[in-house]
Structures are given as C-alpha cells and as structure tokens.
Image (spheres, rainbow, N blue to C red):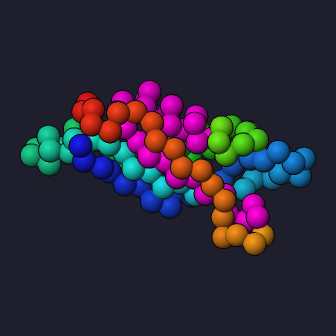
Amino acid sequence: MDIILIDGLAIDTTIGVYDWEKRIQQRLILDLELGWDIRPAAADDDLNQTLNYAAISERLIEFGNSHRLELIETFAERVATLLQEEFSIPWLRLTLHKPGAVPEARSVGVRIERGQRNALP
C-alpha cells in the first residue's frame, strides 16, 4: 500500500467545551496519511485512479465549516468516517492539532488510525 499525504491542512471551525469557544472559530491543523495503491494512476497518468487531495481538502474544510463540535476526538472520528465512506479509503492515519488550546504548549491533539493498512481498493 502506498500513502498519499496531506500535511498541515488548516480548518477553521467552531470547536470546544467552554461557552466562549462556542462563540468563535478556532483553527485545527490536520495531517493525513491516506492508504492507496497509486500504481494504476501512475501508469496511466490519470487523476481519476488516485485520491484527489484537492477534493479531499475541500470536503474537509466544508465539513469543518458546517459542524459545531465540542471535542477534537469527535472531530477526528467523524473526519475519519467521512474519508472512508465518501472516498473509499481503506486505511488512514489522522493527526489533529488544536494550537493555542494550552498556552504553554504549541498545540494539543489526537492521532487515530482507521481501516486495514494492507487493504487495497
């Protein structure tokens, strides 16, 4: 299995448990590793045979704009489900950072893996 990367995708969304957080947007940063077999796309130089990282990025930004959640854990889990269901991604690793959540830390976050790493579409 090959891995397609999307690093540092910035998504502005309403997220947090505190009342003040529910009134503002905060930035989340996503790093994605998406399992895929890129050989067919490479052989034919065909975007339709690989994961379109622009389309994935746009979809995740739209998701962030349309959802108001409290926990980054919930955001990560829903993004993973969305990616697997809408883009048929068999395996992914998602690291989600919430910069500024703890003043003494650059960011806090979660990292999850979903699916079968050796599965091919």
Give the answer, above or below, for where 35 lies relative to 30.
above
Viewer-proximal residue among 100 and 61? 100
Residue 6, x across and y down, in percent: 41, 55
Left or right: where does residue 118 sit relative to residue 98?
left
Q: Residue at x 75, y 61 (%)?
A: 101
Q: Is residue 104 visible?
A: yes
Residue at position x 35%, y 33% in the image: 116
**Image coordinates for residue 31, horizontal then vertical, percent:** 48, 55
Which residue occupies the foreground of this view, 108 or 85?
Answer: 108
Q: How many marks?
A: 0
Residue at 89% in and 52% down: 20
Q: Position of residue 109 (x, y in %)?
A: 63, 55
Question: Residue 51 placed where, x, y %?
Answer: 32, 42
Q: Nearer the viewer, residue 49 or 4?
A: 4
Q: Is residue 99 magenta?
A: yes
Work out which quarter of the rendered image holds the N terminus and state it: top left
> Residue 105, relative to residue 111: is it above or below?
below
Residue 91 falls in which quadrant of the image? top left
Residue interval drawn in magenta: 75-102
Residue furthest to the top: 85
**Quarter of the view holding residue 106:** bottom right
Residue located 51% across and 31% down the image: 81
